[in-house]
Amino acid sequence: MMTACSSRPISEQAIAPIFKLDSVQSLEKYKLFIGHPTPSLYSICRHKTCREIAFVSLSDVQWQNVEALFSPPAISAEYERGQIQQAVALLETYTGEQTNTDNDRAENDSRSGIQGQMDCIDEATNTTVYLRMISKAGLLKWHQEASRIGRGVMTGNIPHNTATIIEIESGTPYAVDSWFEDNGVEPHILPLAEWKSGWWPQ
């Protein structure tokens, strides 16, 4: 798990960026990250391993468009996961327009000239920010937000990270992985156990 040890619920813990602490400037940047995001002001990571932090402020209309995706409320957990996919994609779109991450391509596209490219650490953090705002707005009925998760470190596989949610009724954790797609495309949501096994989209 990629979260600080705390007895407080995940929803009450400040979201912190994950980056290489290689200078005093990095530490100062870390302090600027908004740990308790709101639609009117939140921060995201960009340029791989949160080398840069950008700030976003959504308009009332933009946030109303996000809320509209959850109306009427979901009739099942599966349906709500579809709503979450749409909301994360829309928030990526709005965020990209303000932070120059709208050209972010799937995975770690290394072609030269691409501005705003993000890696899985950026994506996992940013999706966690979106999920926090959605949750705090009371839009989730069937799920609750959870911590970022990593895989591959202890198994010899390529390290990878994702945001997660938990289905309340069953207790099943799900990965919410936006790294596999371009900016503004719906993330993949699948059982975390399957994701941890090395899942990759076909």
Image (cartoon, rainbow, N blue to C red):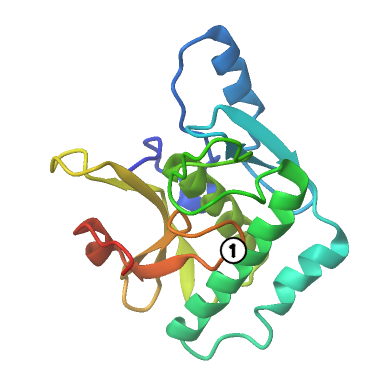
* Residue beneath disc 1: 88
Which x, y percent locates residue 115?
63, 39
Q: Quadrant of residue 84?
A: bottom right
As helix, strand or loop, the secondary structure at mark 1 comes to helix
Which residue extends farthest left?
155
Which residue extends farthest front?
112
Q: Is residue 173 above or below residue 179?
A: below
Amino acid bearing label 1: Val
Quadrant of the drawing holding the N terminus: top left
Residue drawn at the location 62% of the way across and 16% of the way down: 28
Which x, y percent locates residue 134?
62, 63
Instruction: Residue 38: tell me if it is visible.
Output: no
Residue 167 appears left or right of 140: left
Quadrant of the drawing holding the C terminus: bottom left
Residue nearest the viewer, comparing 161 with 40: 161
Q: Is residue 201 above or below residue 133?
A: below
Which residue extends farthest top?
24
Residue 201 appears left or right of 139: left
Residue nearest the viewer, comparing 1 with 200: 200
Labels in figure, total: 1
Residue nearest the viewer, comparing 201 with 110: 110
Q: Quadrant of residue 199?
A: bottom left
Crowd band around label 1 with a 10 angstrom C-alpha radius: few (<14), some (14–19), many (20+): many
Residue drawn at the location 53% of the way across and 53% of the way down: 127
Q: Is residue 89 above or below residue 68?
A: above
Residue drawn at the location 56% of the way across and 86% of the way down: 74
Which residue extends farthest right?
60
Residue 103 appears left or right of 16: right
Instruction: Residue 97: tell me if it is visible.
Output: yes
Residue drawn at the location 23% of the way across and 66% of the way down: 194
